Amino acid sequence: MNHNTTITKRDDFQAWFLNKLLMGMTWPEYMRQMITPFNVAAAIILSVGLPLMGLRYIHGLEVVTDASNEYPWGLFLGWGLFAGVPLSATGFVMATAYYIFGFKRYKPLVRLAVLAGFLGYFFAVIYLMTDLGRPWRIYYPMFVGFGTASVLFLVAWHVATYLTVQFLEFSPAILEWLEAGRTRKWAVMITIAMTIAGIILSTLHQSALGALFLLAPAKMHPLWYTSYLPTLFLASSIYAALGMVIVVSTLSAVFLKKRADDHFLGNLNELTIGLGKGTSIGILVYLALKLVSLAHGDAWGLLGTPYGHWYLVEILGFVLLPALILAVGVKKASVGLVRFGGFHAVIGVILNRINVSMVAFNWKLPDHIHDIIPHWQETAVVLSIFTLHILVFRWILVRMPVIYQDQGFK
Amino acid sequence: MSLDRRQFLKTVSVLTGSAVLGPYTSALASGEFHGWPDRYGMLTDFTECVGCRSCEKACNEVNHLPQPEVPFDDKSVFDTQRRPTAHAYTVVNRYENTGDPGKPIYRKVQCNHCNEPACASACPIHAYTKTPEGPVLYNENLCFGCRYCMIACPFYVPAYDYASAFEPRIVKCVMCYDRIREGKIPGCAEACPTQSVTFGKRSDLLKLAAEKIAKDPERYIDHIYGEREAGGTGWLYISGVPFEQLGFSTDLPEKPMVEEVKGFLSSVPVVFTVWPALFGSIYAASRHHEAYTREEMQHQSKEGGKEK
Ligand code: SF4
Ligand code: SF4
């Protein structure tokens, strides 16, 4: 008798869980709705990139990266870590605004921001592990050897801790999805502590990513090398996060409209304008710091060189211009313009990180520009990881209460 | 054991920020450390080098490195500029001699065994050690292959074994540490048929270099490369032509590279102690404000009700 109940219970659980995963559809139904142009494209990309990542375990890193003795770091870190981490400051910035500073009206976006942050860090670690020579030793800085004078040591610890913090911050959504009310209560209670921990860890590792390059003064172009690098990286991560919330919420509202509720869609236009305002102010603060660092570095003379022109393209076209677009958008209350400005600002931050980590680094070497153009293998692997990132993001958004509120847990 | 514990406590204090209570101490980050007094170094005299590549050959043999693709007596390697690789600790390059075009200059390249090595400051796992004897050593058993040491080395020395799937490692000159311990001299210095590569105490080599320059100011330019560059290196160089003509970086800071990040590192404990207090109070204030507004609103709606 007793025995029987356990079996039914387990069967019940399996059925219930499968139902959760397939969102109430049967397998055939589920598979049929999976065949979309986007998914087909994703499958093609993955079918190239994933085997390459496997080959790396036969022929070494040189299969997937064109990193060399002069250029130890390439696109995996330039894109995945140096651009990925500031764009993932979303969780830290929105949670701080909402929980600590009391910007309560942003509630419909907080979970989305935390999820974007968590996944951003998670995939930054994936990019890092793709680049490491011995990724299975990833925990070494925590338990085996301590390079206390190393900035990378700090980054390693903080990214690992912060990944955990963000998981905890997002856990209420997972627990609601799994209908685990009691555990959820506990998870909610630690939110404030987690948010403050997030502020500490984020301010330090966002700036630490800039500080990494301070160790190589003679290899960096003087226009990008400045003792302000940590400050600049931190300041730009804050507006990058706000811009990224515009990007992610726009994409969710366009492509997952059916999964979003009124709480999210109904407030989005107004909140987007608010985010646009925040982003443009953030950019102006950053721009001011950037000018101070330029004056301080005394590298004005180099503005007339080709690198100087590129520097001006970055500052004028990808920092000042998005700030202006956003300002006009906010003034005219044009959501479309603000969204455009948000995307533009985000691209500007990516450009800056690529410039610091790839263009400015080793600028004196002959053939430099030629040498930093990634090979197709490296590009294919980056595209694959990025595709996985989007797929996982979507998988969660269509299931867990992120852009809709669970009625039972409002 | 007790050392491990100290290291661990230091780690914890850096991470938690309690270091703000005591001086931020780390042999590498402290700046008080000016190197072991009796450490060894090497002196390369470019005016003596004839480009015979005997040092390359000897290095390959004593360190049991793989056979090179091009034999050591083949001079065609000089047609391109080479660098140390995963298979070679040291290489010799040829440079045009602007003063005497018929007599090219040869430059031997290898790890400089810096006084305060940037590679060691970079490594998050402490895989590098500046030994009291002078050589900078790398421990492959600790390394996870982030290659930050390669980014940091101002001399483009460490090479990486990108072709190995499971045991990729950093490769660089070890100044024949084991031979030094046995009382022998490094393979390259022993093999050099001229007076080009000399081994000795760094302090003695500095004196020797200065004497050589003073005795023959026609032959040498008045600069000992490595005396101060990047905080000083264990390997020193003297030359008859300016060092930039031989591909040396001449814009390196005189401070060790780690100085550039000290300011940042010292802000870490501050953030750990100040931030919780600061954001905790902001949180408290905004909670208070919220509660206050809520009360106010309730109050008003009550009064409104009364008026009706
Ligand atoms: S030359 Fe480079 S690898 Fe050698 S000790 Fe100095 S920083 Fe380290
Ligand atoms: S590659 Fe290895 S030795 Fe170099 S910094 Fe990274 S962990 Fe340390």
Image (spheres, coloured by chain):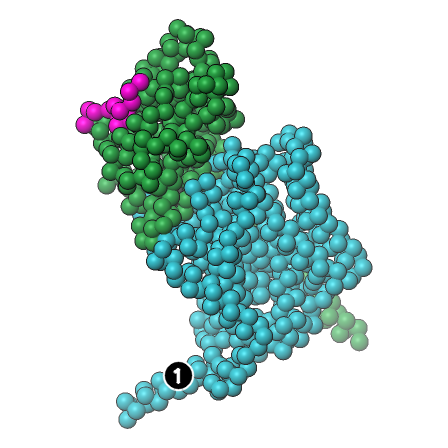
Chain colours: A cyan, B green
Q: Residues within 10 Å of mark 1 (few under 14, many from 20)?
A: few
Q: Is residue B174 visible?
A: no
Q: Main secondary structure of the magenta part?
A: loop
| Chain identifier of the residue bearing label 1 in the image | A
Q: Residue B44 is drawn in which quadrant?
A: top left
At 40% from the left edge and 17% from the top edge, which residue is drawn?
Answer: B47
Q: Nearer the viewer, residue A279 or A375?
A: A375
Judged from the image, the secondary structure of the residue bearing numbered disc 1 is helix
- Residue A137 screen position, x and y as percent: 34, 52
In the figure, A332 relative to B174: above or below? below
- The residue beneath circle 1 is A14
At 54% from the left edge and 35% from the top edge, which residue is drawn?
Answer: A364
Left or right for A56, reference B188: right
- Residue A362 screen position, x and y as percent: 52, 38
- Residue A186 screen position, x and y as percent: 45, 67
In the figure, A167 relative to B108: above or below? below
Left or right for A1, reference A410: left
Left or right for A285, reference B34: right
In the figure, B181 relative to A88: above or below? above
Q: Which residues are magenta?
A: B182-194
